[in-house]
Image (tube, rainbow, N blue to C red):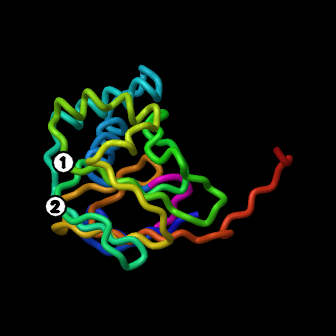
């Protein structure tokens, strides 16, 4: 389980928990657009349409990302994901190496790309092959701090738009115990 501290839509510092993924930038805008529209097309198609709508509207933001006290990225960002799980947005494998039971967060940062390249490379996120692109940074860690101009960059947690950056994500290893049949 993860803990995230962020700024809610009313501008107040708040915190919450997440099981899967917290993200910011384009992905948070897409989640917000999907949640404010009909999902009559089903989850996968609704998120694809939401992603295309978000690509048309989104502008890169200057964002600084620190992982366990070390800088990962400082500059324009299209999207960032702090992942305990692998997939979000109707099956996009944004963090293909993430494991919910390993006690680590996988951080994926997509730097500045043109809208045409974003559309062209969208299938690679569904396949989980986008980590090979030079504009993509990936690291594992336990604590992630994300800074941006306050109120400018949306963030979402487990598919729900919650507020804006700045945010701090932490993994809480072993915080959730699941009971059930062994695989």
Q: Secondary structure at mark 1?
A: loop
* Residue that appears at 62% across and 55% down: 100
Which label lies toward us, 2 or 1?
1
Q: Position of residue 144 (x, y in %)?
A: 40, 70
Please state the extent of the stretch shown in magenta in the rendering: 16-21
Per the image, the residue denoted by label 1 is: 112
- What number is the disc on residue 62? 2
Left or right for 28, reference 61: right
The residue nearer to you, when weighing 83 against 111, is: 111
Specify the quadrant of the image occupied by residue 5.
Answer: bottom left
The residue nearer to you, when weighing 4 against 142, is: 142
Category of crowding for the residue at label 2, using alpha-carbon neighbours closer than 10 angstroms: few (below 14), some (14–19), many (at least 20): some
Category of crowding for the residue at label 1, using alpha-carbon neighbours closer than 10 angstroms: few (below 14), some (14–19), many (at least 20): some
Q: Residue furthest top?
A: 41
Q: Secondary structure at mark 2?
A: strand
* Residue that appears at 28% across and 47% down: 134
Q: Is residue 7 visible?
A: no
Q: Position of residue 73 (x, y in %)?
A: 27, 64
Magenta stretch: residue 180 in it?
Answer: no
What secondary structure do most residues of the magenta stretch adopt?
Answer: strand
Q: Quadrant of the C terminus?
A: top right
Q: Position of residue 49 (x, y in %)?
A: 31, 26
* Residue that appears at 42% across and 56% down: 22
* Residue that appears at 21% across and 63% down: 63
């Amino acid at each position: 389980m993860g803990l995230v501290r962020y700024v809610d839509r009313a501008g107040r510092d708040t915190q919450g928990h997440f099981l899967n993924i917290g993200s910011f930038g384009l992905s948070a805008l897409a989640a917000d657009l999907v949640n404010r529209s009909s999902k009559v097309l089903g989850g996968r198609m609704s998120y694809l349409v939401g992603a295309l709508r978000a690509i048309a509207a989104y502008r890169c933001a200057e964002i600084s990302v620190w992982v366990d006290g070390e800088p990962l990225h400082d500059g324009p960002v299209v999207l960032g994901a702090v992942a305990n799980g692998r997939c979000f947005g109707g099956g996009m494998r944004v963090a293909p190496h993430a494991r919910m039971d390993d006690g680590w967060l996988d951080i994926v940062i997509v730097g500045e790309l043109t809208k045409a390249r974003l559309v062209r490379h969208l299938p690679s996120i569904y396949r989980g092959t986008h980590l090979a692109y030079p504009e993509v940074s990936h690291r594992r860690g336990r604590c992630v701090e994300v800074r941006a101009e306050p109120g400018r960059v949306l963030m979402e947690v487990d598919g729900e738009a919650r507020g804006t950056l700045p945010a701090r994500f932490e993994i809480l290893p072993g915080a959730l115990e699941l009971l059930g049949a062994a695989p």
